[in-house]
Image (cartoon, rainbow, N blue to C red):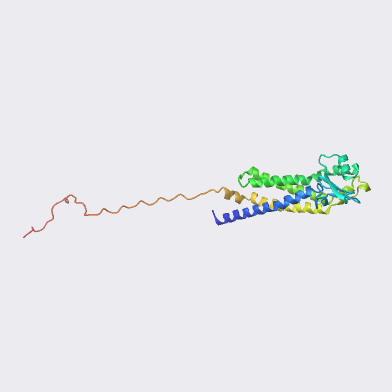
Amino acid sequence: MPIWAESFLKASETVRNVAYGLSIPHIIISSLAIGGCTSANAGIPDIFVAKFAGTSLRFGYIGICNNVAGNGNRTVCASTLGSSASFISDNLSTTEDAIRQVISLQNSASLLMPVISWISFGLGILSLICLRRFRWTGLVKSTQLFLWLSVLTSFTGAWAVTYIVAALASVNFRAKFAMEKGPALIALQWTTFALDLMITCLVYVITASPIEEKISTPASKSPPAKSAPPSKSPPPKGPPPKGPPPKGPPPKGPPPGS
C-alpha cells in the first residue's frame, strides 16, 4: 500500500475516534436537556423550558416541577407522560388549568424536536459502528441521513427554546400565564447542536471520501512477470569424441622415411 494511502487510513481512524469521543458528552448533555424537571435530584429541576412568572412552577420537555410548602418548601417533580392533569396538580399543589397548558406545550412539535434529534443521533452512531465491518453503500447513506437529520432537529429545538417566550406571548396567554425562559436548558440545547454539527461533519469526511473507498477495495494491476531466458548448458567434460576420418583424397607430399 502506498505511503499516502496508509496516512489517509490513519487519519480516518483518528477522525472516527474523535467522533466517538464527542458522542459521549453529546449523549449526556442531550439526555439532561430532555430529562429536565423529571426528578428532584440536584440540578435537574433547574433545567426547564419555561417557568410561570411569579411562581416556582416550571416545566421541561416531559416533566414538571413545583416547590410545595411544608417540609422545608421541598421541590416536587413529576413526569407528564401518561399522567392526568388532576393527578399532577394534586401532587404539585397547583391548578389543573396550568397543568393543561403545560401538557399542551409539551405536545407541540417544537418541543418534540430534541427527542427526534436524540433518536436520530443514536441511530447514526450505531450505523457508523456497523460501518467498521460492513462497507455498504446503503449503510453509508443511512449514517449520513440520520446524523444530518439530528443536526436539523437539534437546531430547531435550540431555536424554539430560545424564542419560546416571545412565541408564547403572541398567543392566547393571559397575564397569569406569563413565562420566563430557562437559561440552563438553552445553553444545553445550543451545546448539543454544536456537538451534533461537529460530529456529523467529521463522519461525513470519512464516509463520503472516494479515496477511502478505493483504498478499501484496491484494483491491483501488476505487470506480467517476465520469463527468464533459457539457460545454456555447459559443454561436457573429457576428451572430444572420436569421429570418422575426414573424407577426400590424401594430402600430397613425399612418402615418410625418404
The answer to whether residue 156 shows anywhere in this view is no
Q: Report whether 42 appears left or right of 120.
A: right
Foreground of the two, 78 or 254: 78
Q: Position of residue 32 (x, y in %)?
A: 77, 50
Going by the image, does 220 lie left or right of 107?
Answer: left
Count how many numbered circles sit on residues in the image.
Answer: 0
Q: Residue furthest right?
A: 175
Residue under the image location 70 percent in, 44 percent down: 123
Q: Position of residue 224 (x, y in %)?
A: 46, 49
Which sits in the foreground, 170 or 97?
Answer: 97
Can residue 90 be seen? yes
Work out which residue is located at the far front of the displayed protein and give it.
71
Question: Percent x, y for residue 112?
Answer: 79, 44
Nearer to us in this view, 45 or 199 = 45
In the picture as drawn, the residue positioned furthest to the left comes out as 258
Give how far across and how far down residue 258 sits, in percent. 6, 60
Side of 240 relative to 255 (left or right): right
